Amino acid sequence: MLASIVLSGLAIGSIYALIGVTYNVMYSASRVFSFTAGTLGMVGGILGSLFILRMGLPVWLGFLLALAGGALLGVITEIVAVRPVLKSLDQHLYVLSTLALALMVQQFAAIEWSTEPQPFPRIFDIARGGFDQTFWLPMAACVITIVGLELLYRHTLVGHAFLAIAEDNYAARALGLPERNLRIASFALAGVIGALAGFAGGQLLLAFFANAPLLTFYGFVPVALGGMGNNRGAVAAGLILGLFQQAANFLVGGIFASVAVFTAFIFVLLAFPDGLAGASAQRRV
Amino acid sequence: MTDASSAQSTSRRAGLFGSAALSHALPFLILLAIGLALPLFAGGYWGVIAQRACVYWVLVSGLNLLVGFAGQLAIGWVALLTLGAYTTSVLAAGNATPALHPYLALAIAGVFGAIFGVIVGLPALRLRTFYFAITTLGFATIVTQIALAWQSVTGGGVGVPGPVFPPPFDSQWGFYYFCFALAAICTWMTANIAASRFGRALTAIRDAEVAAEASGIFKPRLLVTVFIFSGAVAGIAGGLFASLQSYITPDAFTIELSVLFFIAILIGGRGSILGPLLGTILLTVLPEFAAPLVAWSTFLYAVLLLVIVLAIPGGIADLLDFKNRRPLQSNRAIIPRPDLLARLLGQNADRGTLRLERVALSFGGVRAIDGLDLEIRPGQVHGLIGPNGSGKTTALNVLSGYYAPQRGAAQLNGVTLPALVRHTRARHRIARTFQTPRLVGEASVLDNVMIGGTIDGRGSFAESLLSLPRHRRDEAMLRETAMLALGVVGLESLAAVRADRLQHSELRFVEIARALMLRPAFLLLDEPAAGLSAEEIRRLGALLSAVAQTGTGVLLVEHHADLIFDICHHVTVLNLGKKLAEGTPADIRSHREVVNAYLGG
């Protein structure tokens, strides 16, 4: 039992962590938290099932198209729900605009795809085992994403530019960085990561429209606890969240597991409003 | 100009406020008449829709104070509707307890709503906006899941029957009048709050939090009060909703409902009662004309939400605000009347001196101020000058409690003032203005100034809710004082104008009027002359001198050397966080280092 708690906990935690990274990538580029983060995960799952099972495309092609779909939704988020409200960040209109977009996508999926969970294809044609691809795919996706992001941020020029606009938007623009294009690129990247989370976790979560609000909430927990913009913190917090949730699931049952996660989340957050690893910023008067 | 003259006569009040109040109340009276007469001309089906509109409005009226006034994005407020619906139904049906009378069950739902309103709301006091939004959303999910899982009490997915209220409220129109009466009461109560010091304080928290603190508004206490009220009415709305549905299951409480409530408020406009009321009616009636699209209703609501946020952030209230579209007189001048100051401030009792005692404060590695002593005496104007980054504003922020120094402290008459509890400074009659004016752009100039007198009100939130005599006395007193303060700074004629229509120089004087509302023993001004014309600076100087003559100690952080040398009794020059020179204006003018470093010879 312990092994299965750990296995499913780490798998689901990896998905949460990836959605957390999705939030972070968008936040770093725009100082905006977007409600579409979980929606991207849902879209990754549904597109994977659509392309591979329903349309019969090869797995690799379906995978790439699902990621492309995520990237597209990321860019749409930037254009429709983020850019128009960036001028007045202090009014927090982005909370409502991204919520509206997330709901639109979610309802569209419910109506045009299905209101019931649909099966998700197996990616690798190998026999089921104890350490099945259902579990190791999300973990692998998480590792690859984190390593990939580190390499991108540390060793490429584009990555340095991303860091620059995250650190100081005005200074970066003053240096002549194409801030808007970088922001669009960040949102596309976030879209890819979100869709990857949904695709890799497809066999665990299935292709289901209601995954969107679930992932939006559980994906935000690692961001809040790990400190915003902090990817390593998000991964650690995401894995802990997954383990905690699965343990609670086994011990006290599904509903009370949700209550336990929510309560723990609120209490930790009230005690550390800037996350377990974050530092507070001085307010300007 | 007829515009200016009519505005000026407003200051003389008499009958004018009466007619203004009437035109303000007219739309509500029309809605009241339509609502009362509805059974005469509408069929039974419209009765159901009207019931639903009333029930929604009971919830939205409370949520409006939270969202539209205080700017707290509680998107998951549907959780309290769920809670109220289940509480009322379960108690009335006797699933868990002996069956209670429906009214008693409804009242208990209100109490539960109030309690959980505070629980859901508390994170707002500590968390950032998005964090708070998502916690309320999480709460909404959890409540539905519990309703689904706790089968012995809630009936799980099968649900429970809603309460049936005894005659005469069991018939369709009977129940309608019951809901309508509650909706009308909620309208009246929230309108009372909107027009009270509490309503203004909420908008101040939303748009100018630092100014709210400087005016002595204690955000946590006020917000908790509003959470209690909003939670209670949401709980009661839930009980009515359950009766309206006659049978409730967890499916009935979707996020779609929350979005609907939010749209009603946004479409109506922030800081308005009438707008969200019309928005609620509109959104309840609208689906009846869009029956073929019913499957897409959530999608369409989401589209509507996006369109409103992006295209008409002001909502219906803005569209209906005709009087603020009339052009203002373009060549208006600010002519302060210091002679009115005596009436406004009285003679200040001697409150000793306000001082900084060896204060040091650094941000990261940067020493902003380094062992600074400063003394502001009653009745004197103390000038604080120095180049950019020399620590002037930081010193002012330590005095007014916005920054906690690493060493030293601010002291009033020898008693240390605690740092970071900013709202307590107002009680010591220490008022301040800001480098960039912090005002509520959507509120009138008069309302903005009245915010400054918030702590002088005596009535409680409940008294304002019910418009009891103390509330009315407070309002009359605050309005009168604020008109006097506006007269002092010379902006009487603009009292009724929205603050965001004013010119920059006028905003500076509005801030001073707001600060004067505290009858300050000490007035701290952060670059009040920035952006003013030479003539306006001269008038400002005369006004500040007159303020000091009433016994108020004035601290003037400024760049305009002329203003400083004209009106200051005492000048401190800062450089790199340290005192470079100190003395009378004459001393400073001849101080070699100052002349070299700062005045430029």
Image: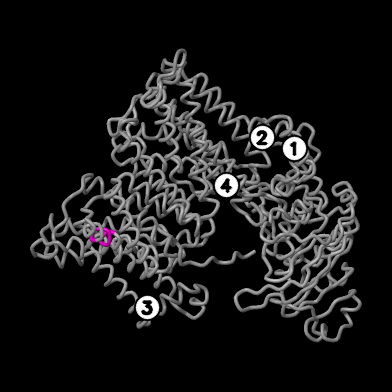
- Residue A215 in picture, x, y percent from top left: 32, 55
Is B303 displayed left or right of A203 in the figure?
right
Q: Do the residues labelled 1 and 4 touch (CB within 8 Å)?
A: no
Q: Name the residue: 80% across, 76% down.
A: B573
Q: Quadrant of the rendered structure where residue A280 is? A: bottom right
Q: Name the residue: 77% across, 74% down.
A: B372
Mark number displayed over residue A214: none
| Viewer-closest of B387 and B498 | B387
- Dominant secondary structure (helix, strand or loop) of the stretch shown in magenta: helix
Q: What element carries label 2?
A: helix
Mark number displayed over residue B70: 4
Above or below residue B133? Residue B148 is: above
Callout 1, which amino acid?
Asp
- Residue B369 in picture, x, y percent from top left: 71, 75
Callout 3, which amino acid?
Tyr
Decide: few, some or many residues near mark 2? Use Cα within 10 Å; few <14, some 14-19, many ≥20. Answer: many
Which residue range is magenta in the image? A7-12
In the picture of the structure, the residue carrying the numbered disc 2 is: B464
Disc 1 to disc 2, how far (Cα)? Answer: 9 Å
